[in-house]
């Protein structure tokens, strides 16, 4: 039995206490963050964390992010806290930034995917922070079946996990729509492992130039130091194709692809920033922020409408655009058409 705890109208301390007790009892609770919904368990309870992997069907070597509510909690999790971590936390926490640091022995290996590093962030959502403060530090990947699009609505979590976890906190639609940015501070130089809700440009204004890991643009890795580096991610049931290039040519390229797929008798969906003739259409928005907020919802909704193929409009890789394109390319399995 899964209980759905409605907090769409705002924070409710009584309801938070119910969810917090479940976390402390080793149960699984899905909850909203500013990025996407997370599937949470007590980060230092190895048996509880194992249940996250089982529920999601997540590979054991795919590390989880630990969510904290106070900077001082880092001392419990990390052996060292470099000056860059302090600068970034002062500027961007709470917020969509995850930092990878050297792991303390107190953190179970199951939580870190067997690595000697730990990924930590402080979410900016009031429900997430209240839940952590009322319980403990929470390990939480996105609350979706492994490999599927991440959830930005409680309804998405219900679709994937109702009857499989103890509780889902419904806090309405998430604000950012893509997961946190992951920055490795254990390498020789700060390295971007996953683009996300905090643009790379903002980070570089605080700590200087950041290296970009090859996995960000699709290179396979043997060891994943952060979620999203090694395994298939964000994929709906329909085949996804991304059309990239100058905007005016992208529009023409999408129209050509729609015709090609129609000629094969396929049901076609399009997700784009301008109305396009297709069997099903999802408007992504007018700004990069709106596109980021809507891409996972678009993938899920077009899937529900029963399309065979989803054609996605590529956007410029500036600001949140880098995170958007990282997600779209992964969702497409790197099926990319150059317009």
Image (cartoon, rainbow, N blue to C red):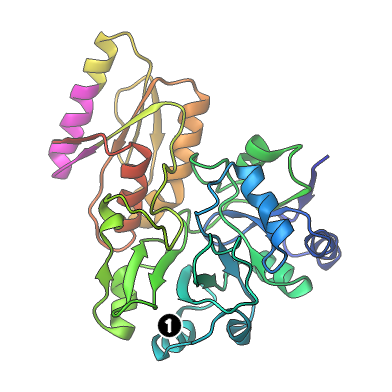
The x, y position of residue 275, in whole percent, is 31, 33
Q: Is residue 45 magenta?
A: no
Quadrant of the rendered image containing residue 205: bottom left
Quadrant of the rendered image containing residue 3: top right
Q: Quadrant of the N terminus?
A: top right
Task: Please say if 334 is above or below 104.
Answer: above
Residue marked by disc 1: 88
Q: Residue at x 39, y 78 (%)?
A: 185
Q: Quadrant of the C terminus?
A: top left
Whether residue 157 is visible: yes
Foreground: 142 or 130? 142
Question: In screen coordinates, is 217 left or right of 180?
Answer: left
Q: Residue at x 51, y 46 (%)?
A: 150
**Which range is magenta?**
243-257
Foreground: 74 or 319? 74
The x, y position of residue 7, in whole percent, is 74, 56
Question: In screen coordinates, is 49 left or right of 327?
Answer: right
Q: Residue at x 42, y 26 (%)?
A: 238
The x, y position of residue 229, in whole percent, is 38, 54
Q: Is residue 250 magenta?
A: yes
Whether residue 171 is visible: no
Could you tell me what secondary structure mostly forms the magenta stretch? helix
Task: Please say if 248 is above or below 24.
Answer: above
Q: Residue at x 49, y 87 (%)?
A: 80
For label 1, the crowd category at 10 Å Cα-Cα, with few meaning under 14, some 14 to 19 and many 20 or more, is some
Foreground: 186 or 36? 186
Which residue is at the far bottom?
Answer: 83
């Amino acid at each position: 039995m899964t209980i759905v705890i409605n907090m769409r109208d705002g924070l409710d301390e009584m309801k938070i206490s119910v969810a917090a007790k479940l976390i402390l009892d080793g149960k699984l609770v899905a909850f909203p963050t500013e990025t996407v919904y997370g599937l949470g368990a007590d980060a230092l309870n190895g048996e509880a964390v194992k249940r996250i992997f089982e529920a999601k069907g997540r590979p054991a070597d795919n590390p989880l992010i630990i969510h904290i509510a106070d900077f001082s909690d880092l001392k419990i999790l990390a052996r060292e806290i470099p000056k860059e971590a302090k600068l970034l936390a002062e500027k961007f926490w709470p917020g969509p930034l995850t930092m990878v640091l050297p792991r303390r022995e107190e953190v179970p290996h199951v939580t870190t995917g067997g690595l000697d590093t730990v990924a930590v962030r402080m979410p900016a959502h009031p429900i997430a922070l209240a839940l952590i403060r009322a319980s403990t530090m929470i390990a939480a990947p996105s609350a979706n079946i492994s490999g599927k699009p991440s959830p930005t609505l409680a309804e998405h979590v219900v679709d994937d996990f109702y009857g499989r976890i103890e509780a889902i906190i419904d806090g309405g639609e998430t604000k950012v729509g893509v997961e946190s940015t992951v920055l490795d501070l254990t390498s020789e130089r700060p390295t971007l492992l996953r683009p996300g809700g905090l643009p790379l440009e903002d980070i570089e204004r605080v700590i200087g130039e950041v290296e970009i890991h090859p996995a960000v643009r699709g290179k396979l890795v043997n060891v994943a130091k952060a979620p999203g580096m090694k395994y298939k991610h964000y994929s709906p049931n329909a085949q996804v194709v991304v059309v990239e290039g100058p905007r005016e040519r992208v529009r023409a390229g999408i129209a050509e692809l729609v015709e090609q797929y129609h000629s094969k008798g396929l049901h076609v969906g399009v997700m784009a920033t301008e109305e396009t003739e297709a069997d099903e259409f999802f408007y992504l928005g007018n700004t990069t922020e709106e596109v980021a907020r809507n891409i996972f919802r678009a993938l899920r909704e077009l899937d529900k409408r029963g399309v065979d193929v989803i054609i996605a409009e590529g956007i410029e890789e500036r600001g949140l655009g880098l995170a958007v394109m990282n997600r779209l390319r992964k969702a497409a399995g790197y099926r990319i058409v150059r317009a």
